[in-house]
Image (cartoon, rainbow, N blue to C red):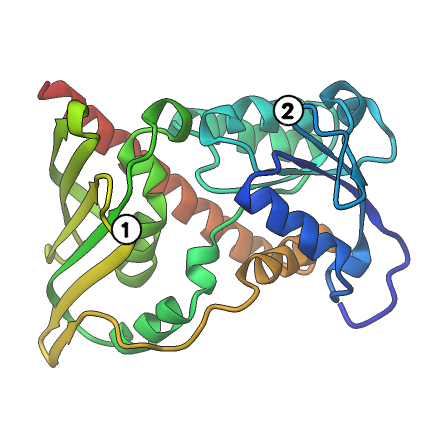
Amino acid sequence: MNTEPERKFGVVVVGVGRAGSVRIRDLRNPHASSAYLNLIGFVSRRKLGSTDGVPQISLEDALSSQEVEVAYICSESSSHEDYIRQFLNAGKHVLVEYPMTLSWAAAKELWALAEQKGKVLHEEHVELLMEEFAFLKKEVVGKDLLKGSLLFTAGPLEEERFGFPAFSGISRLTWLVSLFGDLSLVSATLEERKEDQYMKMTVCLETENKSPLTWIEEKAPGLKRNRHLSFHFKSGSLENMPNVGVNKNIFLKDQNIFVQKLLGQFSQEELAAEKKRILHCLWLAGEIQKHCRSKK
């Protein structure tokens, strides 16, 4: 991406919440990957007119415009599937914030559609670009896991907008799969007190070597956003995360990856491995949801 671009891809950002606003900022600033992209406008259900000098355009115009070649989907998770399908059918490349969809079957279908249309479908995973993950990756490489756990706490999220906790929390599942390989589901339970906006999902997973991993998502008003982890290996233990520095420009790093895909700079093997991991995590999330809901 160091050469002067021969062409720019016209981009529309769908949804201007936290992620959408960061995407617009990165697109407007002079970065290596932004040089290949031309921000045309944004789409929002709210009537905003413009934001930071970027014009609002209708969904219909974004889909029909020859100028728009790329859509960044930064809306609520429940709307992702519909937007992805519409933009792929309109012949646009798509970058979508995780989770791509709220079902494994829908994700498979959309990937098949992207391949049929010859378009890039990229699911953002900024959690894999964090300093903490880079540290963990180095720590676990070559070690034999005996058992592990990952607890995430945060304030409540509306399931109607963001999906079942296994989907809204899929970045934690992605960490575990990226660190320890494909996982199988042993059991899953969900404790809820809706009147208190309290939720605790407890998932027991197993690596291919039958090592147990426990993943817990606990959400309630007043709970601080925090990650607690514990990994025990034959050669020692890792308890909680040391301070490994500030995460800088992780959405921009994700955009760099997306532009490399647009330019055909990823091998088919790399793309296939990423697709396999994403679909595996979505499949696990769906199985966890089924387990939890069947016990109600």
Q: Give the label on residue 243, or none.
A: none
What residue is shown at x 71% (from left), y 29% (from top)?
48
Name the outermost residue toward the right: 6
Residue bearing the label numbered 1? 182
Q: Give the label on residue 46, or none.
A: 2
Q: Position of residue 7 (x, y in %)?
A: 89, 53
- For marks 1 and 2, give the CA distance: 41 Å
Q: Amino acid at mark 2?
A: Arg
Q: From the viewer's side, name the closer residue of 155 and 218.
A: 155
Q: Can I make out residue 102 in this image?
A: yes
Earlier sequence position, callout 1 versus callout 2: 2
Q: What is the secondary structure assignment of the residue under circle 1? A: loop
- Quadrant including the C terminus: top left
In the depicted structure, whether residue 207 falls above or below residue 283 = below
What residue is shown at x 35% (from left), y 75% (from top)?
135
Q: From the viewer's side, name the closer residue of 163 and 287.
A: 163
Q: What is the secondary structure assignment of the residue under circle 2? A: loop
Q: Position of residue 9 (x, y in %)?
A: 81, 46
